[in-house]
Image: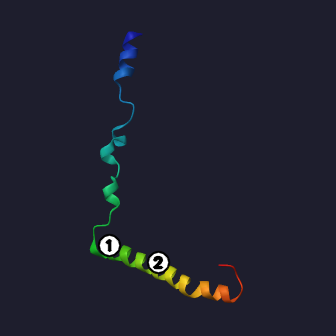
Amino acid sequence: MQDEEDATATAPRYSEAAGVEHHPQITDFIPRRYRSIALVGLTGAAMVAVLVAINTFVVPNSQRLGMPH
């Protein structure tokens, strides 16, 4: 009975593949290639441009049509 308790107390709970060295780190998700960095930057700039265009053109047109601001 005592030998069984010692064996279960020292046995690993998880397999070797579950170790932290086998999981991606947060820095693995940061782009490193210039092409990827440029694509993220251009996507952000395009999103800002769309929001500015909506604010510039849609809001005045909605007020002209009698919709509340």
Disc 1 or disc 2, which is closer to the eye?
A: 2
Q: Nearer the viewer, residue 22 or 26?
A: 26
The quarter of the picture where the N terminus appears is top left
Quadrant location, the C terminus = bottom right
Is disc 2 surrounded by few (<14), some (14 to 19) or many (20+) residues within 10 Å? Answer: few
Nearer to me, 37 or 46: 46
Residue drawn at 61 percent across, 87 percent down: 60
Q: Where is residue 16 in the image (x, y as percent from the top left)?
A: 33, 39
Residue flagged by tag 1: what amino acid is it?
Ile
Residue where numbered disc 1 is placed: 37
Image point (33%, 73%), residue name? 36
Q: Which of marks 1 and 2 is nearer the N terminus?
A: 1
| Image position, residue 20 (x, y; %) | 33, 43
Q: Is residue 4 depicted above or below 63 in this figure?
A: above
Residue 64 lies, in percent from the top left, at 67, 89
Q: Dot 2: what SS?
A: helix
Tell me the number on the disc at residue 47: 2
The residue lying at 55 percent from left, 82 percent from top is 55
